Image (tube, rainbow, N blue to C red):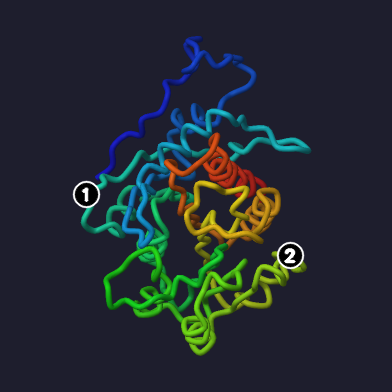
Amino acid sequence: MTKRAALPQSTESGSQPPNNMHHDAQWPRAAHTLAAGKGGAALLGVPLNRSISPGRCDLAPAAIREALLMFSDGVVGGGSAFDLEAYDAGDLDRNTEDWSEAIAEATKGARGTILLGGDNGVTRYGVLATKFDLTRLGLVTLDAHHDFRTLADAEHNGNPIRSLLQAGLPGENVLQLGIQSFANSEHYATEVSEVGINVVGIDQLLMSSPAEVLKRSLDHVDAIYLDIDLDVVDRAMAPGCPGARPGGLTPAQLRAWVSVLALDRRVRWVDIVELDPQRDVNQQTALLGASCVLETLASWARR
């Protein structure tokens, strides 16, 4: 069951946006456009907060929506992020028991789905919510971590990939981009290699083409789920991510990768996770999350 997101009212009536933001009918705010949408691609908040790093990732959907007030729709070179219609499906209840079924129900009929986490455990539930044959589904993660920790202490944001393999997702269907040294243990890195997961470390990623990486690693799948863990970005530029470390991507590099990956017609589901607004500085990480929403929508509109 979802509840309507706490978004500012549409300014179609001419009323001022909150905090006395300037109103210009020719400069639509992305948050208002999504709030007024009726169909197309769905934006859904999934306030899951079972992180092994104490925090409040459940506050992230509201923070990203607030950040969307700072963006409009225009794309460099022409076009709009909303040439493909999109709408805000609200938030799941924090006390949701069956997250996968709730996600599936809330996004039924959507032409594409963007999930606003929440911690990285959202990826497990989002993948299962697709109802797609896992043997034909690809999972791409933009992440500094393998997320392959043991399941012995229950499911959390450190083990969604292991959990999904246990559920039937083949290791060779997983492509992990941006993995960093010293952000993972040798033990789990070895296990990841043994199960056939495709890993592109941060240094190799910076010298790679998104389209070539997809073709080389996931040419055999029919559909793709894209997991955007914001801690793939350098900690100095993503202060709201507890797991971010020095040496990650820049915001511009992340946006470029998201833009190109989302152009692939097989990418139908996206999640944006691991933002803790209480750690953020000047909305820096929330704005990055919001820009990933818009890059995804813009690419879906172009393809």
Q: Amino acid at mark 1?
A: Asn
Query: In this figure, which residue is indicated by the disc labeled 2?
Result: 206
Q: Earlier in the sequence, mark 2 or mark 1?
A: 1
Query: In this figure, which residue is indicated by the disc labeled 1?
Result: 95
- Res 263 → quadrant: bottom right
The one of 131 and 66 positioned closer to us in this rendering? 66
Above or below residue 28? Residue 227 is below
The one of 301 and 279 positioned closer to us in this rendering? 279
Label 2: few (<14), some (14–19) or many (≥20) C-alpha neighbours in 10 Å: some
Above or below residue 300? Residue 284 is above
- Res 51 → quadrant: bottom left
Which secondary structure lies at badge 1? loop
The quarter of the picture where the N terminus appears is top left
Q: Is residue 90 left or right of residue 244?
A: left
Which secondary structure lies at badge 2? loop
- Look at 70% across and 54% down and name the residue there: 253
Q: Amino acid at mark 2?
A: Leu
Q: How far across and how far down the image is residue 268, in percent? A: 51, 57
